[in-house]
């Protein structure tokens, strides 16, 4: 039994890290907001999104394993340069805004415990994230990333502590309930966008390549963008392990998502808090977990702050890193976290620059908790054309050979594209009608 568990843990890697990073500060804020504002009425999105996430992330991982390139590298080689610039441009916009919002949220959450100026904390977390990516080896980095997501279990425990109507929860999970209002549809787009996010596509593909290089399946050429060669031999075991890893990461992500919504609905919405304006508002969702202890509010704030900061430290380097991989493949730079910074200066330089821009975004003075939800909406819109490109790649036999997407992968992939496109269109339509 223990040996099987060890083998299973050994398989986990890019998929689990990507799934865990999906519940970043933006995700926690968005899921908490839908639970607070609409109660259980958007729980049905969680089982709907699971096969959608798996389909898209599996295509991203498979294309990397088969081709030895990331998404930008494939688009640049097999499609037009215009398509490449659009793909990379959309990623940079979404990632930079998301990164800045996450840094602001980490600072806001930390201020619940440490009374320092917000910008001081933003700068600290930004510089610490740069140091983490530049000076910590990939093996060490990836190993510890897996464990930062443990903080999400606070929401799981709170979900059981809060008095809930489990019949209603089950009904809302299985039977969709839609309100044709601009606010409801905006949060739907935000939930979709923070769950099926552009950075996840690029990050998992790039990390699958890192794993391939570490195992010796691919050599590390000067650049991957210009590389051409015969289709590598990909074993059935390799594809199976990738699927186990991806499924595990996405299931973990959606279980956490479900519990965050349930917890927020059962504590915030039931308590009359329908709008999360501050970090303290969001932290109240965890207060029932420690309500029997003295100073329960402070303990809940500490749990929330630790979760936001821990998951933020996992997500911020991923935002910067996925942008760096995309630009490196676009311009033919040396890339990879397995390289030393002195061997890939532009690659590491982009990561540092992205985080510095994220720090600067916080000078605008936007409410950090609101910014997280708006960032999720941007992700929901930007993801649509990126998913379209990814699905085309997954079905392209010239790129994927015998490993093109199968029936179920294509089915759920195109359902994802249509659902996210429809949600975005309906959101804009209701905005215009009520504008």
Image (cartoon, helix red, strand yellow):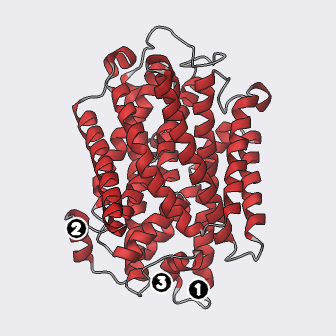
Q: Which residue sits at x=52%, y=10%?
A: 228
Instruction: Tell me if 122 is positioned left or right of 412 in this view.
Output: right
Is residue 271 rendered to the left or right of residue 375?
A: left
The disc, 1 or 2, on the residue closer to the chain's N-terminal end is 2
Q: Spatial distance from mark 1 to mark 2, Cα to Cα?
A: 33 Å
Give the Cα separation between the discs numbered 1 and 3: 9 Å
Few, some or many C-alpha atoms within 10 Å of disc 1 (few <14, some 14-19, many ≥20)?
Answer: some
Q: Nearer the viewer, residue 229 or 417?
A: 417
Q: Nearer the viewer, residue 10 or 361?
A: 361
419 is higher (above) or lower (below) than 369 = above
Do the residues bearing badges 3 and 2 touch, measured as CB atoms within 8 Å? no
Report the label total.
3
324 sits to left or right of 203: right
Q: Residue at x 65, y 38 (%)?
A: 139
Expressed as whole percent of the image width and height from the top left, the position of residue 214 reads 60, 26
Residues under labels 3 and 2: Cα distance?
A: 27 Å
Q: Which label number is shown at residue 297?
A: 1
Residue 338: image x %, image y %? 67, 30
Residue 288 disc label: 3
Q: Residue at x 34, y 32 (%)?
A: 391
Q: How many residues crowd around disc 3 within 10 Å: few (fewer than 14), some, or many (20 or more)?
A: many
Residue 246 percent coordinates (x, y): 41, 41
Q: Name the residue nearer the viewer: 206 or 142.
A: 206
């Amino acid at each position: 039994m223990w040996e099987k568990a060890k083998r299973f843990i050994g398989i986990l890697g890019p998929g689990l890290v990507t799934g865990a990073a999906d519940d970043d500060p933006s995700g926690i804020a968005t899921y908490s907001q839908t639970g607070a504002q609409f109660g259980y009425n958007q729980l049905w999105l969680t089982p709907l999104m699971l096969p959608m996430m798996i389909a898209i992330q599996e295509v991203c991982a498979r294309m990397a394993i088969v081709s030895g390139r990331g998404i930008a590298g494939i688009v640049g080689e097999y499609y037009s340069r215009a398509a490449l610039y659009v793909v990379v441009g959309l990623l940079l916009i979404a990632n930079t805004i998301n990164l800045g919002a996450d840094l602001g949220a980490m600072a806001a959450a930390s201020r619940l415990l440490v009374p320092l100026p917000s910008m001081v904390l933003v700068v600290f977390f930004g510089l610490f994230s740069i140091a983490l990516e530049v000076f910590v080896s990939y093996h060490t980095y990836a190993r510890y990333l897996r464990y930062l997501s443990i903080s999400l279990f606070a929401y799981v425990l709170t979900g059981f502590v809060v008095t809930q109507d489990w019949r209603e929860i089950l009904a809302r999970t299985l039977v969709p309930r839609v309100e044709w209002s601009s606010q409801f549809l905006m949060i739907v787009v935000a939930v979709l966008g923070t769950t099926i996010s552009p950075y996840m596509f690029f990050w998992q593909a790039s990390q699958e390549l890192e794993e391939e290089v570490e195992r010796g399946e691919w050599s590390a050429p000067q650049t991957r963008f210009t590389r051409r060669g015969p289709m590598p031999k990909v074993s059935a075991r390799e594809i199976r392990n990738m699927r186990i890893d991806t499924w595990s990461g996405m299931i973990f992500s959606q279980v956490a998502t479900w519990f965050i919504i349930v917890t927020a609905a059962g504590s915030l919405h039931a308590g009359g808090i329908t709008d999360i304006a501050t970090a303290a508002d969001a932290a109240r969702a965890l207060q029932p977990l420690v309500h029997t202890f003295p100073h329960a509010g402070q303990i809940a704030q500490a749990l929330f702050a630790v979760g936001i900061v821990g998951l933020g430290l996992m997500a911020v380097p991923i935002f910067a890193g996925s942008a760096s991989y995309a630009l490196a493949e676009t311009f033919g730079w040396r890339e990879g976290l397995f390289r030393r910074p002195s061997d890939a200066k532009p690659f590491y330089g982009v990561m540092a620059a992205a985080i510095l821009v994220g720090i600067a975004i916080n000078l605008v003075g936007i409410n950090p908790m609101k910014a997280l939800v708006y960032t999720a909406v941007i992700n929901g819109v930007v993801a649509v054309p990126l998913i379209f490109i990814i699905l085309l790649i997954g079905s392209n036999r010239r790129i994927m050979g015998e490993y093109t997407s199968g029936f179920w992968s294509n089915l759920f992939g195109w359902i994802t594209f249509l659902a996210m496109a429809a949600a975005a269109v309906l959101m804009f339509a209701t905005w215009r009608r009520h504008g």
